[in-house]
Amino acid sequence: MSAADQIAAAESGLLEIRGLVKHFGGVTAVNALNMTVRAGDIHALIGPNGSGKTTTLNVISALYRADGGSIRFDGAELVRRPAHAIAQMGIARTFQNIRLFGDLTVRENVMIGRHVRTRVGFVGALLPGGATAREERETRERALELLAFVGLERTAGASARSLPYGDQRRVEIARALASEPRLLLLDEPAAGMNPAETDALVALLRTIRDKGTTLLLIEHDMNLVMSVSDRVTVLNFGQHIAEGPPADIARNPDVITAYLGGTLDAA
Amino acid sequence: MNRSKAGAIALLVVVLALLPAVVHSDYLLALCDTAGIYAIVVMGLGILLGFAGQLSLAQAAFLGIGAYASGWLTTHLGWSVWPSMGAAMALSALVGLAVGYPCLRLSGHYLALATIGFGIITQLVLINWKDVTNGSDGMGSIPPPAIGSFVFDTYGRYYYIVLVAVIVCAYVAWRIKTTRVGRALEAIRENEIAARATGIDATRYKIVAFVLAGTYAGLAGSLLAHMTKFISPDSYSFDQSVVFLVMLIVGGSSSISGAILGAVLLWFLPEVLRPLKTSYIMVYGAAVIAMIVFMPRGLIGLFEGVRARFARRSPEAA
């Protein structure tokens, strides 16, 4: 591979965001954002409060509709597709304010995560044997495997609501992984976790990446960001102000200004 | 489903099947038939509200559509009863689709209001479309079903048609609840945003639930028409839809046995309260309020709570 090819390969990302705009009334939450997430990376999206990180994630997963720009996932345009279609294309996510199916069991939560990988519909439900029974068994087994993977096999039968906070975050990760995503979006996965739980999370995220899933995460815990990320994008006022490896980002004067206060003009 | 639960259900079905051998009062048998028919309506509502979390106050309208479709096809077009029942279900399903498609973009109170509107419109159509429905005078001479020369023309005989229908409807609801479609519906009820982000086409699944609720009510309406042989629009009112909702809530909304239990219990409660004469409605109302306040998860929730308490007290028995 020539040097030019290598650069081209590195430049072409799994997720390419170009000129993304999102307004809420008169407020521009995301303003002409450009960003590339390379396949196989753990990519962190950081920035001060209100800089548009969660909005960006919500627009990628189509919980919000973009007001302009383009989001390409493996070449396919995501903007204007409904949320469920984006999940079907291989993008799963977790939520900052945890959104589990609270009354259902932990295992059922993860089984629901298999939705896009399973087929049985209304007619199949009425024919209990054969393919339906097989798929149901596989769904159940796969859910238990994933719960073991995130370290929650013992709580499979508990209601999701009854779990402690940190465990609920791991159920969300297991549910997201159940769809076998190519890109996993994580909105503050370490929020509310103690240091031991955070260490376990870092190991878990690395394992997920090493199994071939690309991760894009929002996180406030800078130690976690610096230790786990392959690449970091910094947002401020809905705009991209820096992108690069974590060590470079930590030394970037624009980033330091954004975090310590002051305006970009003053920097 | 575990073995003891399956055994209990089999035993219950046998007991229920023997009921007409013991009960000889035509009046009581008619009540039993109607209780079963209402259980079907409430199970349908259970799929929509209990599983998918979408409130409809139009179940009585779908009951009316099923009743009139079946009545009209048999009396005006001379169809035999069984295909009319199928057609009544199909029509209710189609109307459910046509109404559900626009309505299920709404949520919460707005959805409830839209279904109330649909229910009232339906009743007005039944009253005023006299060429088809015979208006407020009602439609009579609706024939009973028959298999060969065996005519289901007594309440005791009709009971078995209702029993089979209840079992089939409960089975369908149970299969839905315990497989992928039911999990998708429950995901929508629990957290619609998370459900969508998990790849569930929430609008489509809500429409499926709405159509199923309509189909159940349509079947029940047809069963009611061929049982009573006479139908009139006043049975398919908004008030009746509220009664179905209360039956479901009292029984336990996300449970199939709760739906059946709630329907049967609240259908027979006025009979039990009959000695109170005119003040029965007060006691009935108070009883319903008490059940909703003290059993927020319905009768089924109460049973499960008692069972859990016994399991805690006697761990050695577990």
Image: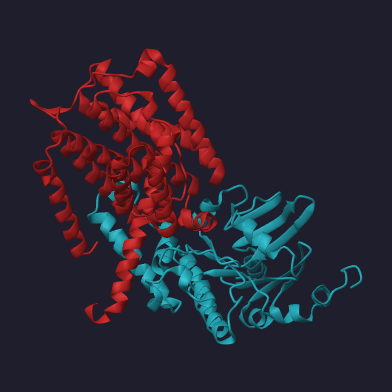
Chain colours: A cyan, B red
> Which residue appears farthest toward the bottom when viewing the image?
A196
User: Horizontal and vertical percent for residue B76?
Assistant: 28, 15
Residue at the image point whose x is 35% and y is 33% from the top? B63
Residue B230, compared with residue B201, is above or below; it is: above
- Tell me if I can see residue B184 in this picture: no
- Tell me if I can see residue B245 in this picture: yes
Residue closer to the observer: B310 or B86: B310
User: Horizontal and vertical percent for residue A122?
Assistant: 34, 47
User: On the picture, is A61 further left or further right than A22?
Assistant: left
Residue B141, compared with residue A219, is above or below; it is: above
Residue at the image point whose x is 38% and y is 48% from the top? B248
Q: In the picture, residue A63 is in which quadrant?
A: bottom right
Residue B219, compared with residue A189, is above or below; it is: above
Q: In the picture, residue B272 is in which quadrant?
A: top left
User: Horizontal and vertical percent for residue B291?
Assistant: 39, 54
Which quadrant of the figure contains the N terminus of chain B?
bottom left
User: On the picture, is B290 further left or further right than A201?
Assistant: left
Q: In the picture, residue A95 is in which quadrant?
A: bottom right
